[in-house]
Image (cartoon, rainbow, N blue to C red):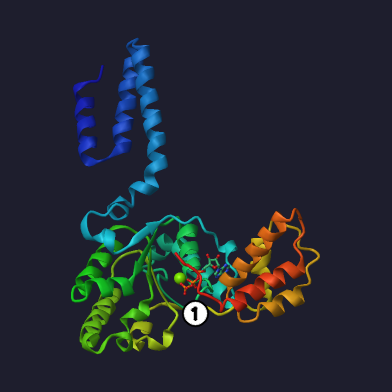
């Protein structure tokens, strides 16, 4: 049986929330019981501890984000959480963007090394570019590669919904940044631009922008902050200056179009495709639209019982996207 000291150690580790100490004392109790010939009890206790430890490993990731992923009260209406498993290889990026992305990932992964020298990793990123070119996807990849939760914040929705209280809501979000390390995506950050506000809201938007600038500047957290916009011309210079890295996204070039299609059609034979015709037909389309066209061509191929994608199917699908007036993709 457990000694009085072991009982006290169990209670103390429970009170401290120190699970590993709790389990280690429980194992000592099991060992003592085994020595005393109580084999059955010792084995049962060991099995229980093993099972609990396994369960704990599986839930560690979830547990660390409970304060925000199951927000009590207001936080729930301000952000949504996801756990992307996206990888850098899923993205088709220009050399410059790819370099910037890998730079951020590298510094984030080495943040302990940096901090030992009093240095902080890059963690404030501004992503600029037309719809469907990979801004949200990049935030998902950073979360996926770093094993962090992704929290998405729609500033325009918050401002419309909480006019007058927006700055207080921003404070809640920036508190969460400190509490739970994650990737925080502030989408449509141009909602903070005075030009977009109705005349009677200009003063309020100005106040919200100032609070946002102040929170950004003073944020002591280790979270990654990503702001995204399709309208960089609306952004205040003071805001742009607050970011460590600016990533300018653009429509894909011919190589990019081909890479998006090949990624999407990885399970099909594409050796017979005439890429010049395909890339010509993609002119002006975003990565997202090219990806949708590739999927449509793939469906047509499957449903007609073929294994090989035909150039004509791809070109027709791309033309469809162009004719559809290049509608904006639905994004996360
Ligand atoms: N650079 C890219 N490489 C590979 N796929 C991409 C890329 N950009 C977009 N896609 C595809 O298009 C979809 C939508 O893209 P994403 O949400 O990243 O666009 P966005 O730039 O955030 O657009 P928006 O400005 O509308 O929010 C992605 O889920 C992905 O399938
Ligand atoms: Mg997006």
User: In the figure, is residue 189 to the left or right of 256?
Assistant: left
Q: Is mark 1 within 8 Å of ligand 1?
A: yes
Query: Where is residue 130 drawn, in percent x and y?
Result: 50, 79
Query: Where 5 sits versus 225, above or below?
Result: above
* Residue pictured at 47% horizontal, 67% vertical: 331
Q: Secondary structure at mark 1?
A: loop
* Residue pictured at 70% horizontal, 69% vertical: 314
Query: Where 292 sits versus 276, above or below?
Result: above
User: In the figure, is residue 152 to the left or right of 304?
Assistant: left
Query: Where is residue 110 drawn, in percent x and y?
Result: 46, 62
Query: Where is residue 26 drawn, in percent x and y?
Result: 31, 27
In terms of image quadrants, where is residue 308? bottom right
Identify the residue position indicated by label 1 in the image: 129
User: In the figure, is residue 212 to the left or right of 241?
Assistant: left
**In which quadrant of this rendering is ligand 2 seen?**
bottom left
User: In the figure, is residue 86 to the left or right of 315?
Assistant: left
Instruction: Sort mark 1 into few (<14), some (14-19) or many (20+) by Cα contacts within 10 Å.
Output: some
- Quarter of the picture containing the C terminus is bottom left
Query: Where 86 sits versus 229, above or below?
Result: above
* Residue pictured at 37% horizontal, 60% vertical: 182
* Residue pictured at 35% horizontal, 9% vertical: 37
């Amino acid at each position: 049986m457990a000694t009085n000291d072991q009982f006290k150690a169990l209670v103390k580790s429970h009170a401290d929330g120190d699970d590993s100490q709790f389990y280690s004392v429980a194992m000592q109790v099991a060992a003592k019981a085994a020595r005393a010939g109580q084999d059955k009890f010792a084995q049962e206790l060991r099995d229980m501890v093993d099972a609990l430890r396994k369960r704990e490993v599986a839930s560690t990731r979830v547990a660390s984000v409970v304060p925000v992923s199951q927000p009590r009260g207001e936080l729930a209406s301000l952000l949504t959480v996801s756990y992307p498993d996206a990888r850098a290889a899923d993205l088709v990026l220009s050399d410059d963007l790819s370099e910037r992305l890998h730079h951020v990932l590298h510094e984030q992964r080495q943040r302990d090394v940096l901090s030992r020298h009093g240095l902080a990793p890059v963690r404030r990123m501004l992503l600029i570019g037309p719809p469907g070119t990979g801004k949200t996807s990049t935030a998902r990849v950073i979360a996926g590669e770093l094993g962090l939760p992704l929290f998405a914040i729609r500033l325009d929705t918050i401002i419309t919904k909480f006019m007058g209280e927006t700055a207080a809501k921003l404070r809640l979000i920036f508190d969460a940044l400190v509490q739970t390390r994650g990737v925080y995506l502030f989408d449509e950050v141009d909602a903070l631009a005075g030009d977009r506000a109705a005349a009677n809201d200009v003063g309020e938007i100005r106040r919200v922008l100032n609070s946002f600038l102040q929170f950004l500047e003073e944020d002591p957290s280790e979270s990654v902050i990503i702001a995204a916009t399709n309208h960089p011309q609306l952004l205040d210079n003071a805001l742009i200056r607050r970011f460590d890295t600016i990533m300018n996204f653009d429509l894909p070039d011919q190589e990019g179009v081909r890479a998006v299609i090949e990624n999407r059609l990885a399970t099909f034979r594409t050796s017979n495709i005439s890429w010049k015709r395909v890339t010509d037909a993609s002119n002006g389309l975003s990565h997202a639209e090219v990806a949708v066209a590739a999927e449509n061509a793939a469906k047509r191929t499957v449903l007609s019982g073929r294994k090989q994608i035909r150039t004509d199917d791809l070109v027709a699908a791309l033309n469809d996207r162009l004719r559809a007036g290049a509608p904006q993709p639905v994004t996360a």
